[in-house]
Amino acid sequence: MKAPPSNSPFWKLMNVMSRVNVAAYRASGGRLGNHIGKAPVLLVHHVGRRTGKARVSPVLYLEDGDRLVIVASKGGTDKHPAWYHNLMASPDTEVELGRERRRVRARKATEDERSTLWPRLVQMYDSYDDYQRQATTHRVIPVVVLEPR
């Protein structure tokens, strides 16, 4: 199924659902809203690059040693998610894993890293391959590495 365009009302609904997920995740110490299928969820903090407003988004992640890896898929739609642009503009941030907070620095994975990480990400959440196929004519879905700081 093709992703709705980024200006679709669907994404406004997804933003509301994300806020509910963040609230449930925090209220339960990460016991609720902590997985989509077998893929774990973290909360990534970011600051709006235009508004300066603090934001938090639930995002699937893959552990890679002491690094965490996230994917800016936005369901394969025509644009990167806002959190991706915000992290690239202001990469020093925090993530929440259950009740634990970690200070991290975000960066876009190199092409070599992406080619190594992508199969592991798809194994964790197979919809990523579908999303990339949908987005291929528009964009390459970024993989973001969150390194400890």
Image (cartoon, rainbow, N blue to C red):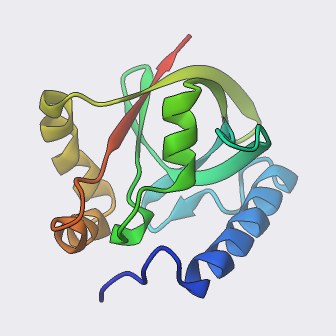
Q: Is residue 72 above or below residue 89?
A: below
Name the residue located 33 percent from the left edge and 69 percent from the top edge.
76
Name the residue located 14 percent from the left edge and 36 percent from the top edge.
116
Q: Is residue 4 above or below residue 124?
A: below
Name the residue located 33 percent from the left edge and 62 percent from the top edge.
125
Residue 139's x, y, as percent?
24, 58
Based on the displayed image, in which of its 4 quarters is residue 99 positioned?
top right
**In this image, 127 relative to 70: left or right?**
left
Residue 135's x, y, as percent?
24, 68
Q: Residue furthest right?
A: 27
Q: Nearer the viewer, residue 72 or 51?
A: 51
Total numbered badges shown on the rendered structure? 0
Q: Quadrant of the C terminus?
A: top right
Based on the displayed image, in which of its 4 quarters is residue 101 positioned?
top right
**In this image, 88 relative to 95: left or right?**
left
Q: Is residue 97 above or below residue 125?
A: above
Name the residue located 74 percent from the left edge and 46 percent from the top edge.
55
Q: Residue furthest bottom?
A: 1
Residue 130's x, y, as percent?
23, 73
Q: Is residue 101 above or below residue 34?
A: above
Q: Residue furthest front?
A: 50
**In this image, 2 relative to 32: left or right?**
left
Residue 49's x, y, as percent?
64, 38
Q: Quadrant of the N terminus?
A: bottom left
Q: Nearer the viewer, residue 142 or 41?
A: 142
Based on the displayed image, in which of its 4 quarters is residue 74 positioned?
bottom left
